[in-house]
């Protein structure tokens, strides 16, 4: 038997695994699918064409799968996908995508979203991230795995944040952030490599040394961006350990569309 509070309103067309828990006064729409072991707290609204995986936990007053906050939106069918084992705390808002982009907002697995986090339309969030209170993504933002967004940080539309980056409290981002970089400020400024986070995740000394050297080539050498790319290519040719991490940084520079914080 599903563990559904009698005051919850669940559309008969919604697909909920039999192990899903739904708290008091929560509302679940007709095009929602929720996987095994997921817990929906009280006063949660889950709507739109939303697919949610296993063992997620949604706390009170979250609004999930609502229409995009985009003036061009005209009621088209768009989607939200959420993976497994995510923690979504109070008052979070995750919106569906828009047809002007891929029509999909996508969140990975094993993420922590603390109170009042906003994930706007067409964003892509990886796995193992932490979004502290009031962190907010505008539309079309891409966030890599293991990124940490500190409290009250905000990201401009179409920005990209590379894996393992750390964004400090109250940071305003209007450009892209390469992998492994630690930054903060308004406007944002780079302040080195996220060494503490990388050590906690098991990066060894050769990997850390390679990342630090790549950071210096991008930020401390006085190179233009094209010169920095050439220097990174040369670094990768000389490396054995650490080359995959340098390649991540090098590839990110090519993929950047808004330019990097520099």
Image (cartoon, helix red, strand yellow):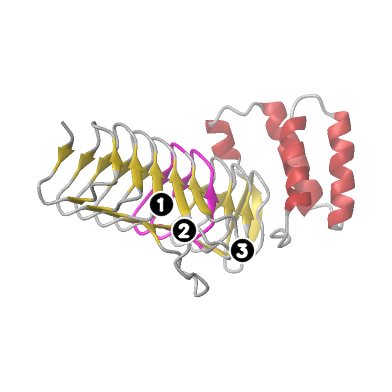
Q: Position of residue 187 (x, y in %)?
A: 61, 68
Q: Describe the element under mark 1 as helix, strand or loop.
A: strand
Q: Is residue 151 left or right of residue 157?
A: left
Q: Is residue 7 left or right of residue 195?
A: left
Q: Which residue is mark 3?
A: 188
Q: Position of residue 87 (x, y in %)?
A: 35, 42
Q: Which residue is mark 2?
A: 77
Q: Earlier in the sequence, mark 2 or mark 3?
A: 2
Observer-nearest residue: 97 or 152? 97
Q: Describe the element under mark 3 as helix, strand or loop.
A: loop
Residue 40 sits in quarter:
top left
Residue 129 got which mark?
Answer: none
> Callout 3: 10 Å neighbours few (<14), some, many (20+)?
some
Q: Are marks 1 and 3 in contact (CB under 8 Å)?
A: no
Q: Which residue is mark 1?
A: 49
Q: Position of residue 224 (x, y in %)?
A: 86, 58
Relative vertical location of residue 99 with respect to residue 162 in this rendering, above or below: below
Task: State the quadrant of the C terminus.
Answer: bottom right
Q: Earlier in the sequence, mark 1 or mark 3?
A: 1
Q: Is residue 114 magenta?
A: yes
The span shown in magenta is 109-137
Q: Are marks 1 and 2 in contact (CB under 8 Å)?
A: yes
Q: Position of residue 117 (x, y in %)?
A: 40, 57
Q: Residue at x 52, y 56 (%)?
A: 168
């Amino acid at each position: 038997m599903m563990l559904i509070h009698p005051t919850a309103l669940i559309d008969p067309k919604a697909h909920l695994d039999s192990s899903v828990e739904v708290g008091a006064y929560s509302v679940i729409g007709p095009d929602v699918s929720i996987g095994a072991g997921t817990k929906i707290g009280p006063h949660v609204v889950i709507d739109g064409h939303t697919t949610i995986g296993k063992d997620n936990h949604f706390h009170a007053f979250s609004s999930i799968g609502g229409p995009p906050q985009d003036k061009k939106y005209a009621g088209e069918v768009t989607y939200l996908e959420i993976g497994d084992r995510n923690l979504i705390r109070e008052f979070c808002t995750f919106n569906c995508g828009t047809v002007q982009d891929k029509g999909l907002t996508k969140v990975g697995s094993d993420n922590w979203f603390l109170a009042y986090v906003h994930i706007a339309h067409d964003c892509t969030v990886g796995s193992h991230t932490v979004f502290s209170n009031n962190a907010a993504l505008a539309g079309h933002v891409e966030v890599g795995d293991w990124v940490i967004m500190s409290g009250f940080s905000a990201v401009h539309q179409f920005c990209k944040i590379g894996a393992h980056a750390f964004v400090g409290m109250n940071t305003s981002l209007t450009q892209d952030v390469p992998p492994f970089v630690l930054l903060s400020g308004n406007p944002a400024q780079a302040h080195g490599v996220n060494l503490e986070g990388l050590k906690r995740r098991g990066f060894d000394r050769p990997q850390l040394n390679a990342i630090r050297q790549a950071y210096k080539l991008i930020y401390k050498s006085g190179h233009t961006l094209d010169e920095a790319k050439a220097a990174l290519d040369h670094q990768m040719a000389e490396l054995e350990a650490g080359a995959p991490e340098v390649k991540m940084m090098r590839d990110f520079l090519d993929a950047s569309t808004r330019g990097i914080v520099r």
